[in-house]
Image (cartoon, rainbow, N blue to C red):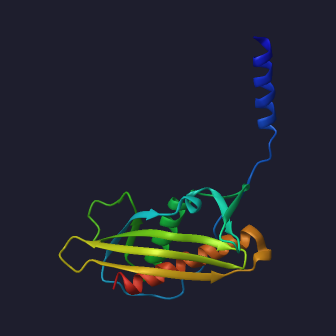
């Protein structure tokens, strides 16, 4: 009986000695332009990412299409939450509208609800961060509901490592906010 308890204590001690993973914050690029949209208030209802992109681990796609990650290199925030917050911040700055991610924090209801479903959201070894998927704009007041496809990419220097990937992700979310503002919210 003493041997299993001793072995368990050794395993716990070894686990505690493991290296702490590096976490990377996505920098927020400056929003310098303005884009009018047709709504005063927009809720980012849902962000749906592929399993590899929803993970805390920073993934990289190889030339053979294989997506790999290193458990020691993580995003500082959960990706779906972070993307929703980044997108709402960019849309608010671009449009001047009241934009927030779900759950809607205001008493009055939003004029539109935005949902994004990513098919792909990954950096590759060649220095491209790509985002591909579909957006949906739901409207409750009888105006036209919309949907559309997006396929965006941002170049980065692969030698810059995770920091370069994080900066590219920040830029692609700003580019996506511009795209959705022009194509889905006008």
Which residue in the rendered view is the most extreme toward the left?
142
Residue 2 sits above or below residue 15 on the image? above
Residue 109 sits above or below residue 125 on the image? above
Please provide percent x and percent y for residue 50. 52, 63
Kindly identify the residue that appears in the image at 76 percent across and 30 percent down: 12
Q: Nearer the viewer, residue 41 or 75?
A: 75
Q: Which of 69 and 20 is in front in this view?
A: 69
Quarter of the image for residue 61 reads bottom right
Answer whether residue 64 is visible to the viewer in this image: yes
Query: In this image, 62 relative to 44: left or right?
Result: right
Q: In which quarter of the image is the C terminus?
A: bottom left
Kindly identify the residue that appears in the image at 78 percent across and 12 percent down: 2
Please provide percent x and percent y for residue 181. 41, 82
Q: Which of 50 and 111 is in front in this view?
A: 50
Which residue in the rendered view is the most extreme toward the front?
64
Quarter of the image for residue 161 reads bottom right
Quarter of the image for residue 103 reads bottom left
Answer whether residue 24 is visible to the viewer in this image: no
Kindly identify the residue that appears in the image at 38 percent across and 80 percent down: 148
Q: Quadrant of the N terminus?
A: top right
Please provide percent x and percent y for residue 152. 54, 82
Query: In this image, 142 relative to 182: left or right?
Result: left
Q: Nearer the viewer, residue 131 or 25?
A: 131
Total numbered badges shown on the rendered structure: 0
Query: In this image, 143 relative to 39: left or right?
Result: left
Kindly identify the residue that appears in the image at 19 percent across and 73 percent down: 141
Please provide percent x and percent y for residue 16. 77, 36
């Amino acid at each position: 009986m003493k041997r299993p308890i001793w072995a368990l204590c050794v395993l716990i001690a070894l686990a505690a000695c493991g290296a702490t993973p590096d976490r990377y914050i996505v920098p927020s690029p400056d929003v310098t332009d303005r884009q009018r949209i047709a709504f005063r208030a927009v809720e980012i209802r849902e962000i749906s990412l592929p399993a590899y992109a929803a993970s805390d681990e920073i993934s990289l796609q190889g030339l053979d299409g294989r997506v790999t990650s290193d458990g020691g290199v993580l995003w500082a925030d959960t990706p779906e939450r972070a993307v929703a917050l980044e997108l709402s911040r960019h849309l608010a700055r671009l449009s001047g509208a009241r934009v927030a991610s779900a759950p809607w924090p205001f008493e009055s209801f939003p004029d539109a609800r935005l949902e994004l479903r990513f098919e792909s959201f990954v950096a590759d070894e060649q220095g491209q961060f790509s985002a591909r998927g579909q957006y949906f704009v739901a409207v409750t007041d009888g105006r036209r509901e919309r949907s559309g496809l997006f396929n965006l990419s941002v170049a980065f220097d692969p030698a810059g490592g995770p920091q370069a990937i994080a900066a590219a992700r920040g830029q692609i979310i700003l580019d996506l906010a511009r795209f959705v503002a022009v194509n889905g919210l006008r």
